[in-house]
Image (cartoon, helix red, strand yellow):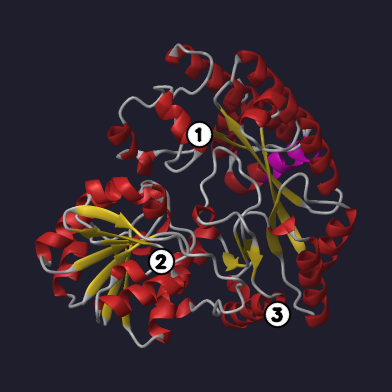
Amino acid sequence: MKVLLINPPMQIGDIPKFPSFGIAYIAQELKRSGHSVEILDIDAYRYPKDEVARFIEKSCPDIIGIGGLVTVYPYLDWLIPEIKRLKPGIEIILGGPVASSLREKCFEKFAIDYEVLGEGEATIIELLAELGGSRMLNKVRGIGFRENGKIVFTEKRPLASSLESVPMFDDTLFPMDIFLKNTGGFVQIHAQRGCPSNCTFCFNSFRVVSNRVRYRPVNNVLDEIEHLKDKYKDKIRVFAISGECIATNKKWLIDFCKEIIDRKLNIKYRITSRVDTIDIERLTWLKASGCVRMSLGLESGSDKILKIMNKGTTAEQGRSAVALAKKYIPDIEASIMLGYVGETRETLRETVAFCKEIGLEPVLFYALPLPGTVLYETAVKSNFIKDEEEYMMNLDRQMILNFSVNLTDIRNDAEAKRALEAAVYEIKRYYSRKKMMKPGTYVNTILKLKDKGFKRTFDETLLNIKKLF
């Protein structure tokens, strides 16, 4: 079959940063099975809608597959009717998190014909085989389809027992130069699927089936890193080892570090970790093998909020983890989520104090209920989200500090917004002042005067001072 795979834009107003692993591995599996594949990567190229329409009109696929995060939902409201207008007889398969988290809703809303739910590589091959043959769709596990005016969902497909068969990422399918430019030299390496945790704000496509965690073999991951390193050379500054929590499996992590050293790769890389999955042994190996950045999901400085999140950690664990990690890893990313269910002025004060105590400026964002999560269900049941369709049609525009829904115990929306903005302001002002007071700041100002002149230096300095107050 000739298959057209479409990758819609994930976030309006944000530049594309990484290729879609979902689209990539589906494309590679289809090719391996003898299908012809073309990719329309709207997210990477940000094609205007008229150009997308012209592309679809000129294309001649037997079937179209679309995937993406739930944030593509508003774009699908234009894309799918446009496909049906231009290609009335074409059948559409929807996959990825948007299908898995909104399986009934997507059938009700869009004129799609099939859904691939959860892990898709094996499912799509079986589905296409049935569509090209006897069309006994009930035999295919992990799909949804229309039958006699009804929506039918088949038995869940078990997760692949291992990730050994995951192929080396085919970078020729995507405009890597765009991503490398937009990220300043970061490239993602797919290493892990699944997460053992059940945080109430998180949706994981693989957890649709199971919360089992699987890793690609260490050698496979490092073969891919070597290939990209040799091909792109200095264009790549940091390899971002992709997974929900890379540090979960201690043996895999240490084997990974040892193999980097044995191969003398001399790379810089980033990993993800929970605050309860790092220790001195892990950190020692990470430092020795080139880990320069670690992302820690702290989420809150309030034990009350952490408990509501079902995070399974405490604020004290967060403090200790940051203090320990900073001794080994030069750059620690810490995320803090404000405005969660149960948030009060008191819990916000706790989080502000926590952010000052840890000694590094965290990435701040407001809680955003995503379909498929416990948080979303709570927001709907509690009437925090009053119009689901309106809410989902704006998901592609939600920025990290956009107050879109009041989940807090401060039930007056205006007061809640002011309280959150005040917390953000206090944290940012604290770290802005620390930066201004760093040794060398005045020397740098003199150098700027020499390089940029008085007026430009004065204007920039004045702008920085205003940010403090």
Res 375 label: 1
Q: Residue at x 26, y 52 (%)?
A: 76
Question: 434 or 344: nearer the eye?
Answer: 344
Residue 287's quadrant in the figure? bottom right
Mark 1 or 3, nearer chain start = 3
Question: 120 or 436: nearer the eye?
Answer: 120
Magenta span contains residue 61: no
Q: Residue at x 62, y 74 (%)?
A: 234
| Quadrant (top left, top right, bottom left, bottom right) of the N terminus | bottom left
**Residue that label 3 marks:** 219
Mark 2 or 1, nearer chain start = 2
* Range covered by the magenta-colored residues: 438-447
Mark 3 or 2, nearer chain start = 2
Of circles 1 and 3, the one toward us is 1
Res 141 label: 2
Residue 15's quadrant in the figure? bottom left
Label 1 crowd bin: few (<14), some (14–19), many (20+), radius 10 Å: many
| Quadrant (top left, top right, bottom left, bottom right) of the C terminus | top right
Question: 373 or 225: nearer the eye?
Answer: 373
Decide: is 298 above or below 49: above
